[in-house]
Image (tube, grey):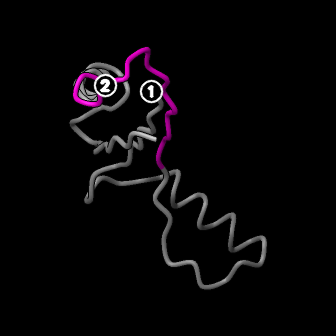
Amino acid sequence: MKARVTVTLKNGVLDPQGKAIVGALGSLGFDGVGSVRQGKVFDVELDTSDKASAETKLKAMCEKLLANTVIEDYSVELI
């Protein structure tokens, strides 16, 4: 079973990399970009066909390693 985990900064957490991207886009001629928030995407393949088990394992992976839940949110999508 394949899954996609998307990790993003929580609202209110400063995103210096996003600000740098906004500046770089402006210098490349892409005007009108108000803000950018950066994140991470993980494509994970699990050796199971049980959706409930896969979701449980993926949540544990996010809580323990893939996301810093103090400052990041995550979402899991089975694909």
Name the residue carrying label 2.
54
Disc sitting over residue 1 in the figure: 1
Q: Are marks 2 and 1 in contact (CB under 8 Å)?
A: yes
Q: Residues within 10 Å of mark 2 (few under 14, many from 20)?
A: many
Whole-percent x and y of residue 79?
Answer: 46, 41
In this view of the protein, which residue sits in the foreground, 41 or 77? 77
Taking the image as shown, residue 15 lies to the left or right of residue 54, namely right
Instruction: Work out whether 68 lies above or below 7.
Output: above
Q: Secondary structure at mark 2?
A: helix
- In the rendered structure, does residue 56 fall within the stretch colored magenta? no
In percent of the image, x 50 and y 64: which residue is there? 36
Whole-percent x and y of residue 27?
Answer: 74, 71
- In the rendered structure, does residue 48 fall within the stretch colored magenta? yes
Whole-percent x and y of residue 55?
Answer: 27, 30
Taking the image as shown, residue 35 lies to the left or right of residue 63, namely right
Q: Which residues are magenta?
A: 39-54
The Cα–Cα distance between marks 2 and 1, rounded to whole angstroms, is: 8 Å
